[in-house]
Amino acid sequence: MIRRMSRANPLWDAPRIHGELLKLGIEISQATVGRWMPWRPKITSPTWRSFSSYFQYHHDARTHLSINKDCPRPRPVQPPSTGNNIIASPEVGGLHHRYERRAA
């Protein structure tokens, strides 16, 4: 799951992936996430054009270190009992993804 998230979201680092995993009810340390992330070269930053959809993503989906890896508009934790299938929903034109559990 760590490698899948890292490939789908090349701008994410270990704390961001760790926050998403916590929201999926997967208890793992941030250091472990960093160890399992694949190495990749730096990618250039997105342009101002992608700002319009990033603002909504920032408040509704993105986990933040300063608020205990939650979103400004809190997202509930989805425990494994919610479903075993984890799907990725593209956000901000595919630059980022939001992960949710779905029933099989």
Image: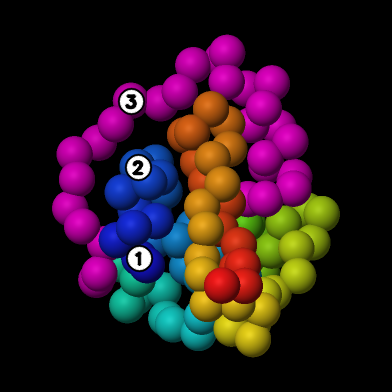
Q: Is residue 86 above or below residue 95?
A: below
Three-letter code, disc 2: Pro
Question: Disc 3 designates what residue?
Answer: 44
Of residues 95 and 100, which is closer to you in this image? 100
Q: CA distance from mark 2 to mark 1?
A: 12 Å
Badge 2, how many Cα within 10 Å: few under 14, some, many 20+?
some
Question: Disc 2 designates what residue?
Answer: 10
Q: CA distance from mark 2 to mark 3?
A: 10 Å
Q: Earlier in the sequence, mark 3 or mark 1?
A: 1
Badge 1, how many Cα within 10 Å: few under 14, some, many 20+?
some
In the shown orientation, is residue 67 left or right of residue 27? right
95 falls in the magenta region: no
Could you tell me if residue 66 is visible in this image? yes
Question: Disc 1 designates what residue?
Answer: 2
Secondary structure category for the residue under label 2: loop
Q: Magenta region: which residues?
A: 35-62
In the shown orientation, is residue 27 left or right of residue 25? left
Q: Residue at x 56, y 47 (%)?
A: 89
Three-letter code, disc 3: Thr
